[in-house]
Amino acid sequence: MTVQTQEASVQDHERAWLDEAIRVATESVANGGGPFGALIARGSEIVCLGNNQVTKNLDPTAHAEVTAMRAACKELGTFSLEGCVLVTSCEPCPMCLSSALWARVDRIVFCADRHDAAVAGFDDRRFYDLFEKQPASMWPMRVEQLDLPNRTAPFDAWLAKSDRVDY
């Protein structure tokens, strides 16, 4: 198989996966969830699907991407999604992007962007702005560090634990 053929095959998979993520997002709306869908793929196979369940489950972290990553980790029996692709109907918000980084997905593929989402009433642009431009003093909530003498106690215990699972 030539490099061009391999690239075309990958693009065909990604287009099909995006179609599936859009289908999941649209179905989510019909079932009381938000208009976002995502999936985790490994190789040429879909591992798990996820949809936005924020209002359905009263969980502000239950975005489609996070839901898909949680399900994929359970399915694969690991907390690392190395070798996987996150495919999502819309550009991941900063929380989902951070979650994908923590999960170590290889790539993210999305279709609609943050501006498309804003038109539908899901305006996360302020969060992007917050992280990109605003000093912490301009954040909508206060973030403070208190320096206590035992601040590293949990990390010390972790490092001393001989049977820890590093991540």
Image (cartoon, grey):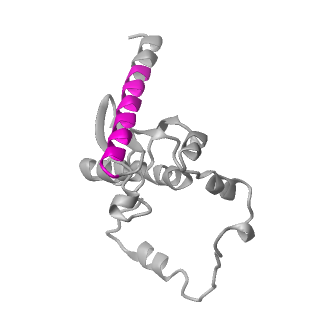
What type of secondary structure mainly makes up the magenta span?
helix
Q: Is residue 62 visible?
A: yes
Instruction: Provide residue 68's location: percent of width, then percent of height.
Output: 35, 48
Instruction: Provide residue 122's location: percent of width, then percent of height.
Output: 54, 50
Farthest bottom residue in view? 149
Q: Which quadrant of the figure has residue 39?
A: top left
Please tell me which residue is depicted at 31% across the width and 47% down the height of the picture. 72
Instruction: Provide residue 166's location: percent of width, then percent of height.
Output: 40, 61
Q: Quadrant of the C terminus?
A: bottom left
Please tell me which residue is depicted at 39% across the width and 43% down the height of the picture. 37
Q: Which quadrant of the figure has residue 1?
A: top left
Please tell me which residue is depicted at 73% across the width and 67% down the height of the picture. 138
Image mark count: 0
Q: Which residues are magenta?
A: 11-32
Name the foreground residue: 78 vs 8.
Answer: 8
Q: Is-magenta flag for residue 28? A: yes
Please tell me which residue is depicted at 64% across the width and 73% down the height of the picture. 141
Instruction: Provide residue 99's location: percent of width, then percent of height.
Output: 47, 54
Please determine whether, in this image, residue 61 is positioned above or below residue 142: above
Q: Is residue 39 visible?
A: no
Name the foreground residue: 88 vs 8.
Answer: 88
**Is residue 92 shown left or right of residue 19?**
right
Q: Is-magenta flag for residue 86? A: no
